[in-house]
Amino acid sequence: MSCRIAGVRLPTPLVLASGVWGTSPTLLERAARTGAGAVAAKTCTLAPRRGHRNPTAIDWGHGLINAMGLPNPGAAEEVELLRDAARRLAALGVPLIASIAADTVEDFGRAAAIVSEADPALIEVNISCPNVESSHGEMFASSAEAAAAVTRQVKSSTPIPCLVKLSPNVADIAAIARAVAAAGADGITAINTMPGMLVDAESGAPVLANGTGGISGAALKPIALRCVHEISGAVELPIIGTGGVITGTDAVEMLSAGAACVGIGSAIVFRGENAFSSILEELKVWLAEHGYRCLEDIRGRTHRGAGAAVVVTNPPPVPGWEKTRA
Ligand code: RRO
């Protein structure tokens, strides 16, 4: 079940997605103890941010929508939490992924240098948050030039390998992936949440205090699979395939689309804190039942044009899964 991403060994292919369990060292450690092969901390910025007012995150029936607003204590305070988390995770052989965001290309470099002091195994460069206004005017992930400029700046600011987190809300995600690859990215996380909105029928008002938010969970899976398929067809970089993976079968699909490993986020809300161990077990059982020996056997099957029977299941057929939604 082990795999590698940007030269870093993961004992399992499941990665705690950034933001789900904050940067609390005890929660990051819990993810590792329950089956995560790498854990990503909440994105931090140079200055602390309070985030948006509640309501900030809601289960709307087919996934989640959030507009947290990038709440974080600022890079200087976050780095102390990262140090503690890195020490706990090292004892378990699970790499830590720091995550950074910024308003300017230069501040991305500064944030990368600060979090590097905690010596994380990887740095995720979040250029795709859908919920914050930037002085840049639009997400850096929106343009190949801006995404490449951030990547170059981070690469020149730290020796730690970096993963660039892309947005599904672009016309040509493969072009953005090619640009960050040419700029020196060591890997790609695909994808961030998809911008969306809930409206309350009674009042006609937006449900989230921020108005719009980022959609994750089951509704995001087909979008994430398409993005990972397109990126893996365009660049050689390893991809953390993230978006709507709730079951072991979802993980099989993500690896088949070309992901090197699989991000887990909303699944923790829907399946509880044992999501990692459950998904890992389901993945192992699926591989064994289908006669595959290792992850490499299924990676990138979508590019090999495997014509297969399509079985659409909704909700995913995990015993007890429905009950967690009550
Ligand atoms: O904090 C957030 O609102 C947030 C972030 Br930084 C992100 O990258 N993706 C998301 O869905 N929410």
Image (cartoon, grey):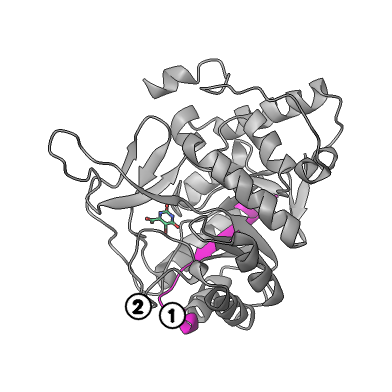
Q: Are marks 2 and 1 in contact (CB under 8 Å)?
A: yes
**Three-letter amino acid code of the residue under disc 2:** Ser
Q: Position of residue 312 (x, y in %)?
A: 60, 23
The N terminus, quarter of image: top right
Q: Which residue is mark 2?
A: 135
Q: Is residue 200 left or right of residue 289?
A: left
Relative image position of residue 251 (x, y in whole percent): 66, 36
Q: As displayed, is residue 222 above or below residue 121?
A: above
| Residue 233 image offset from top left, x and y in percent | 74, 56
Provide the secondary structure element on which disc 1 rests. Answer: loop
Q: Where does the C terminus fall, quadrant-wise?
A: top left
For disc 2, the neighbor class at 10 Å (few under 14, some 14 to 19, many from 20) is few
Under mark 1, the amino acid is Thr
145 magenta-colored: no
Which of 163/93 is in front?
163
Given residues 1 and 313, the one toward you in this image is 313
Residue 226 at least partly seen: yes
Q: Residues within 10 Å of mark 1 (few under 14, many from 20)?
A: some
Quadrant in the rendering for residue 210: bottom left
Residue found 68% across the figure and 62% down from its top: 187
Q: Residue at 55% x, 77% y: name it.
A: 150
Q: Which residue is mark 1?
A: 104
| Ligand 1: image quarter | bottom left
Observer-nearest of 119 and 259 = 259
Question: Magenta residues?
Answer: 89-107
Of marks 2 and 1, which one's residue comes earlier in the chain?
1
Q: Secondary structure at mark 2?
A: loop
